[in-house]
Image (cartoon, rainbow, N blue to C red):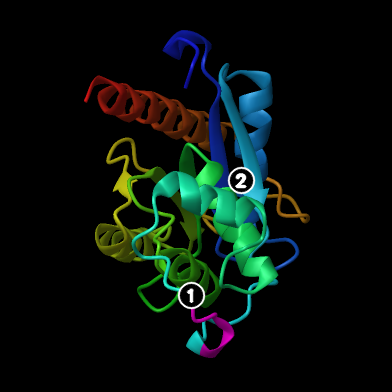
Amino acid sequence: MAMGQEKSVVKVIAISGSLRKASYSSGLIRAAIELTKESIIGMEIEQLDISQLPMENFDLEGDEDNTSLDVEILHQKLRYGAGSFPPVVEDFRQKILESDCILFSSPEFNYSVSAPLKNAIDWGSRAPNVWADKPAAVISVSGAMGGARGQLHLRQIGVDVDLHFVNKPEFFLDAFKPPTKFDTQGNLIDEQAKKRLKKVLLALRTFTLRLQGNKCGN
């Protein structure tokens, strides 16, 4: 970034692993967006809709080999629609590429992340991998363990796609334990949870700026 870190705006792409209309995972992202507008200076969050992504299928990809492209050339290919993926996938990959960091929010499905989220990760990891070297944070809401096992699996996936996750603070939320955490529209209403969520966002911003500073110094 051209400006000093204290004035930099960290651009975050947020991805919900749940497609349900009143999804609690999406509710966490909406709460995060509100927090950045109300009390976190220098951070903007945009939620990406992954519901329209087709299932990852090599037959939907073109024959062009992008593996050896310079990042800047790849950026231009994605910007002007000259890539080898379906348009909705190209758009998704471009958003990831242009972001500073990623915020994942997902329920836990069978000790893992949801199928839509895994599909989105798989599309992004196709060569050239647009997740590579991105800072990331993960928050989750589920049953008793709050999605902890799903988070662990996501962090393992992150090793292969070269994501750099914030380790602390962690955010797990049991949606069904009193007091009430969400309203009927899936909006987060628990103030303590919001305070914990804010700490994650601040940590993600600090971590992102630190990694960017290290890159500038190399």
Q: In the picture shown, does residue 77 fall above or below 21?
A: above
Tag 1: Cα neighbours inside 10 Å, few (<14), some, or many (≥20)?
few
* x 26%, y 25%: residue: 214
Identify residue type, mark 1: Glu
Counting the numbered discs, the total is 2
Nearer to us in this view, 63 or 159: 63
Report which residue position mark 1 lands on: 64
Q: In the picture shown, does residue 175 fall above or below 164?
A: below
* x 54%, y 42%: residue: 98
* x 41%, y 33%: residue: 204
Q: Residue furthest left?
A: 218
Is 201 in the magenta?
Answer: no
Which quadrant is home to the C terminus?
A: top left
* x 45%, y 9%: residue: 4
Q: Which residues are magenta?
A: 59-63
Q: Position of residue 48 (x, y in %)?
A: 64, 54
In the image, which disc is placed on residue 29? 2
Which picture quadrant has residue 51? bottom right
Q: Position of residue 193 (x, y in %)?
A: 52, 37
Identify residue type, mark 2: Ile
Q: Position of residue 78 (x, y in %)?
A: 59, 56
How far apart, in angstroms, are the residues tagged by discs 1 and 2?
A: 35 Å
Nearer to us in this view, 117 or 195: 117
